[in-house]
Image: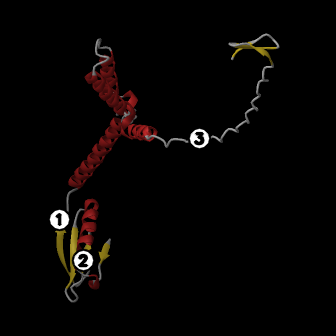
């Protein structure tokens, strides 16, 4: 079998054809490079060069024993590669699956929340300090820290904003009541004048026996 390469293909394909001939040589034993003396065209063959071409041995012929040994070594190399691939596949099948990422812990279930809650509880359990101004400040600071750790920054910020809005004093509501109607006073009734019947030097007497100073 002879493979020919036209001259206009250049030397770029020479290496490719040379590799192909080397591969064929593993079965036929030798590779010859045939050069046309007139055109300079180069061909490779595992047989003999045509007339008018200069023959140059690229790969010497090998004995059947050497060829058989090379084929055996190639088969052993393929078997070792297949065995390694099987072992890697078995190891990958037995390897534990990667653990799923743990779900994020909510602020209410975090260790910081538990610590802040315990600190506030210990502060509330201290006897004899309920009326101290310093104790009131410590209690307020501990409660604020517990709310921050157990709610998280976002929820705590919303809580503080809600508190600030509720603490703003509202405008006083003025209720104007209509004036109550004035009822006219009943007319004053003059008591009847007593009918004096007689008088003496000091007193006067009426018809009903009442006495009046004179």
Circles 3 and 1 in contact, beta carbons < 8 Å: no
Q: Quadrant of residue 188?
A: top right
Dot 2 and dot 1 residues touching (CB under 8 Å):
no
Residues 185 and 211: in front is 211
Report the residue marked by disc 1: 60
Q: Is residue 7 left or right of residue 177?
A: left
Label 2: how many Cα within 10 Å (few below 14, some 14–19, many 20+): few
* Residue sitting at x 18%, y 69%: 58
In this view, the residue in front, 49 or 214, is 214
Nearer to me, 98 or 105: 105
Q: Position of residue 50 (x, y in %)?
A: 26, 80
In the rendered view of the protein, which quadrant contains the N terminus? bottom left
State the residue in front, 95 or 101.
Answer: 101
Q: Nearer the viewer, mark 3 or mark 1?
A: 3
Residue sitting farthest toward the bottom: 38
Closer to the camera: disc 3 or disc 2? Answer: 3
User: Which dot marks residue 199?
Assistant: none
Q: Of the residues under marks 2 and 1, which one precedes in the sequence? A: 2
Residue of label 2:
12
Q: Position of residue 41 (x, y in %)?
A: 24, 83
CA–CA distance between discs 3 and 1? 121 Å
- Determine the image quadrant of residue 9: bottom left
Residue corresponding to mark 3: 175
Q: Secondary structure at mark 3?
A: loop
């Amino acid at each position: 079998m002879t493979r020919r390469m036209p001259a206009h293909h250049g030397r770029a394909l020479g290496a490719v054809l040379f590799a192909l001939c080397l591969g064929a040589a593993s079965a036929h034993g030798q590779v010859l490079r045939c050069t046309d003396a007139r055109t300079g065209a180069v061909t490779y063959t595992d047989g003999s060069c045509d007339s008018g071409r200069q023959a140059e041995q690229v790969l010497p012929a090998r004995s059947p024993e050497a060829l058989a040994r090379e084929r055996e070594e190639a088969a052993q190399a393929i078997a070792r590669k297949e065995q390694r691939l099987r072992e890697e596949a078995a190891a990958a099948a037995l390897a534990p699956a990667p653990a799923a990422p743990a779900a994020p812990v909510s602020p209410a279930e975090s260790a910081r929340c538990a610590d802040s809650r315990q600190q506030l509880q210990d502060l509330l359990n201290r006897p004899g300090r309920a009326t101290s101004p310093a104790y009131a400040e410590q209690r307020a600071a501990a409660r604020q820290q517990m709310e921050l750790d157990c709610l998280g920054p976002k929820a705590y910020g919303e809580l503080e904003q809600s508190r600030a809005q509720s603490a703003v004093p509202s405008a006083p509501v003025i209720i104007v009541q209509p004036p109550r109607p004035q009822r006219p006073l009943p007319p004053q009734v003059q008591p009847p004048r007593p009918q004096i019947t007689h008088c003496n030097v000091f007193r006067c007497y009426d018809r009903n026996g009442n006495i009046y100073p004179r």
